[in-house]
Amino acid sequence: MKLDLTGKTALVTGATGQLGRVIARTLADCGANLALHYINNETKARELQGEIEAIGRKTVIVQGDVTKQETAFQMRDEIHSSLGAVDIVVANAVIQYAWTTVLEQSPDDYISQFESCVMQSVFLAKAFIPAMKEARSGRFIGINTECAMQNFATQSAYTAGKRGMDGLYRVLAKEVGEYQITVNQVAPGWTISERDRNSEPGHDEGYIQTVPLKRRGEDQEIANAVAFLASDLSSFITGAYIPVSGGNVMPAI
């Protein structure tokens, strides 16, 4: 038994970000061809494209604001003309902002989080799920967060966006399940990424003490969960919110 994505085409939004790059590389390592989405960092997108093509995978770069419906449909057309229909969608892009209290948080931050967490996935679904329905196969994967269960102070805009995303994915899973399309979420904890490895150690001991495994997760561990959900090994898993947080959050029945 092995995790094999040979012949599949995967779209990763926010592919030039810290986690997005590792997800894209991991899917490529499993055999998938990649559509790499970016919004601003074309240089990083080109570098990632070169890496993936060097191991024999096909790639296409797509650019745009994924909070806009026209971007999703434009990406669909560009990807289809280069790689064919998309089999795997990974909604990873998110708008970054400064966290503060509810009373001090700008209303614009709530809007941006709703747009990037919820509406991005709505538009991606509208663009890519029709072809999956026709093929009676597909994987739709969203990157959520442990924060959606924690609800800590200053997390309100992010948590609101991600909890809205959770509801959307659960409903979508029920709507498209009969077509053998799975819809799942991976929810990382505070993850060690390339940025952390190349900087001085952070003040994370307090966080680590809350984690049953007594460490922070690695970006590769998040990408491994995404690759599993993208594969045939997860064919009977849908509607799931899967924390990859060392046990820091545990969904209950």
Image (cartoon, rainbow, N blue to C red):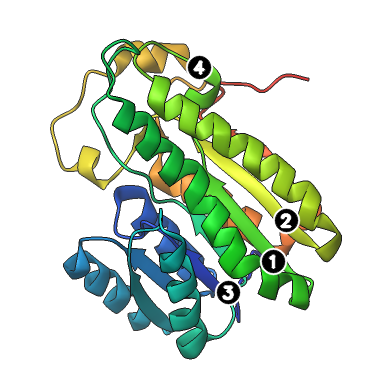
Above or below residue 68? Residue 215 is above
Contact check, label 4 and label 2, Cβ < 8 Å? no
Kindly identify the residue that appears in the image at 23 percent across and 27 percent down.
Answer: 98
Please give the residue where the numbered disc 1 appears in the rendered image: 138
239 and 196: which one is in front? 239
Please give the residue where the numbered disc 3 appears in the rendered image: 86
At numbered mark 2, what does the secondary structure look like: helix, strand or loop?
A: strand
| Mark positioned earlier in the residue sequence (2 or 3) | 3
Q: Image quadrant of residue 152?
A: top left
- Left of 170 or right of it: where is 62? left
Q: Position of residue 96 (x, y in %)?
A: 28, 38
Kindly identify the residue that appears in the image at 54 percent across and 69 percent down.
Answer: 30
| Mark positioned earlier in the residue sequence (1 or 3) | 3
Contact check, label 1 and label 2, Cβ < 8 Å? yes
| Mark positioned earlier in the residue sequence (4 or 2) | 4
At numbered mark 1, what does the secondary structure look like: helix, strand or loop?
A: strand
Outermost residue on the right side: it is: 178
Please give the residue where the numbered disc 2 appears in the rendered image: 182
Please give the residue where the numbered disc 4 appears in the rendered image: 150
The crowd level at tag 4 (other Cα within 10 Å; few <14, some 14-19, many 20+) is few
**In which quadrant is the C terminus drawn?**
top right
The crowd level at tag 3 (other Cα within 10 Å; few <14, some 14-19, many 20+) is many
| Mark positioned earlier in the residue sequence (3 or 4) | 3
